[in-house]
Amino acid sequence: MNQSLRPLFWMAIATATLEAMGTPVASAMVSQDAPPPAEAAMVAGIAPAVARPIAVRGGVIMLPLLAQQSGSGWPDRIRLRFDSGDEIDATLVRVFSTVPRAVHWTTSPGGLAVEPVVAGSDPLVQGASVFALARVPESLQGDFRLRAVDQGDADSAAASAPGATRSPEALVDDRFAVRPVWVDRPSPPWPEAPALPMEGGPGRPDARSPFDWWRWALLARRLRAQPPPPEGNAVEQLVAQHAADLWAVGLARLATQSEGVAAECVELLTNTCRDGSVEVATWVIDPLEVSTLLNILVDFNRLDRSVMEGAFTWARSHAPEVAWVESDAGASIEIAIANPSVAEMPASAQWLVTAKEVGEPVSFVLAPRSVTRIRLDRPHEVPGDTLGRIDWSTVPMSVVVAIEKRELALSVPPAVFQAQPPGFVMPPFRAVLTLAEARRAAAPAIDRSTAAMLRRVRGRWEIFAEGATGGAIGGAIEAGGPAAPLDPVEPLQLPIGREALTLVVGPKGSPNQVLCVPLVGAAWMTRGGSPDQWTDLEIRRRVDSDAWRLRVVLPDAWLAPYLGAPLPLAMVRTHADREAFEVTGAPPVPWSNLPAPTLVDLGVWVGFPSAVDRAFPNGSDRSR
């Protein structure tokens, strides 16, 4: 099946395809058993992928396209010829997945971007899909067909491409009519209200994504304001307007049946609360869940009452509260629960081990429109361990938070990890916590992996770390500089904009040592003195074209307090060419960059032979 038919969220947002209203054109054109096109083939048979898209009068139409034969030579425009004889030109755009350069609380797990199709190219590479995008005059409606645009001769990049000796009829297949479902755009609810400022933060949608602007429009509606104009280029603004129009149409339709259900859906899509002075989003963010609601609202093959019932069922299946683990090491953990409701909510937390309840539930009250944090002591017994042979601290557990009839499940790793030969692999490096991850939709994608190991070599404890760069950072690796002097209020400043690994030794919030090791230049410390005063601190680095390797031999004095107790250790990787950073252990929320340490028991590693270091022969590139 052609790549443009993948059931992704943007397809639902862009076209709101109504399966019951007719078979997609693609099924009549493309055989799933067809052989792959020949190498270096030219595109042919461009046609609509759906026959009945939703189109808002005077709005933007975004029609997915496919090709009977894929290849290069795509045009950058296509013509929509209506049965009335009117014609408009549509810009071809490609929608593709991308990794965000910076991860925020409201970063969508979809990770999508849009750009114009370059004439003569193959826009379907790397899993992208192609759409025809155009603003339709309010007076124009009815059915239309696709036609090739006469772009001239040699001045057309598509026509001048090698092997592009084909007629416009071969390029575009006009046999299939597109019969849009035309709907009116509702009037804005607050036409005289001021515009909502386009400000960033954990309580606002991603301002840079055209696929999230519809939520700005809903948020403005809830706050009795006008939405801010969408950001980006002309193509991105059209995409943003298209999605916002579909939501406006669907919610207006729902409100004719039940204003209460419509308001409940808007709340679930725009809910926020406060964490101290910070406004925090709690809305439903899973792309599949969001697209499910939209498809219910704009399914004009359903009766209006059926739409209301479907939206009501959708709303009651989603919890407005959000919970996450803030620290998970040691004899107790800290969890945070965000409650966007205007009322206090009674809640309880129950430990589970191997799906069995352990101990009594802990009851507490969630403050209204706030983030509430509670600390839970780990249970000291493991179900089924009648002889007491299991160390409870090494057992993974879970916590179930019950709020009325809703339950939120949280996974909790073991309290303590044991360092054993050949080395203890630190927990995976993860991006900062996002709303999508807290709601269990998906963790943000990371395109540059990092791994680290704590090991004992020649009687000394050391960190060995490796970070992939993909060859993308180039000369930027030397950019940036040391962090500012330590702020007594903020115990950790990360070297954002610097390719570096930061080691944090000690408890969360009050570490004993914080060592920042850049890949180029001298290391520095923001807690625990300076590198020069630790004579047994060793730092060795090697930078290759696609990765770096780092070895840090830790001073004995840093570890002395933990010879009889677990070592609290956290690591943070920052990048030279982006704001994103990754941490080991429980990821912090974006409005607090404090990493949660992992507790490592060093006492188990006794009497074993030292490991052999092969990554840095002859002690190459040693520095402090």
Image (cartoon, rainbow, N blue to C red):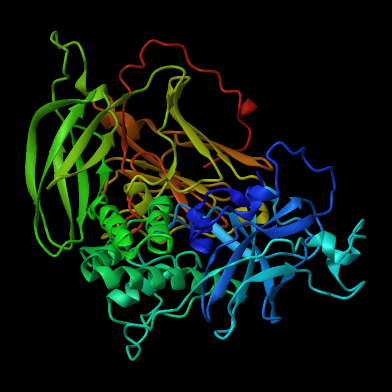
Q: Residue 192: where, in percent of width, then height?
A: 33, 91
Image location of residue 548, percent across then percent down: 60, 40
Tell me if I can see residue 296 in this picture: yes
Judging depth in this view, the residue of 5 and 10 nearest the camera is 5
Which residue corresponds to the image point at 31% horizontal and 65% vertical from the top-left? 270
Determine which quarter of the picture holds residue 275: bottom left
On the rendered structure, is 96 left or right of 123? left
Residue 256 quadrant: bottom left
Left or right, 435 with reference to 67: left
Please tell me which residue is depicted at 62% across the width and 70% down the height of the picture: 133
Q: Residue furthest bottom?
A: 192
Q: Residue at x 42, y 33 (%)?
A: 554
* Callout count: 0
Q: Please tell me which residue lies in front, 67 or 198.
A: 67
Pick the front one: 287 or 450:
287
In the rendered image, is residue 434 in sight? Answer: no
Where does the image place residue 20, in percent across and percent down from the top left? 48, 54
Left-right relation of 158 to 534: right
Quadrant for the N terminus, please: top right
Q: Is 457 rendered above or below residue 506? A: above
Task: Say if 436 sits above or below 264 in the image.
Answer: above
Which residue is located at x 55 percent, y 64 percent?
Answer: 53
Q: Is residue 494 above or below residue 451?
A: below
Viewer-closest of 6 and 81: 81
From the top left corner, tell me how far across and down residue 59 is, in percent: 53, 78
In-image side of 28 versus 198 (left or right): right
**Which residue of the protein is positioned furthest toward the top in this rendering?**
387
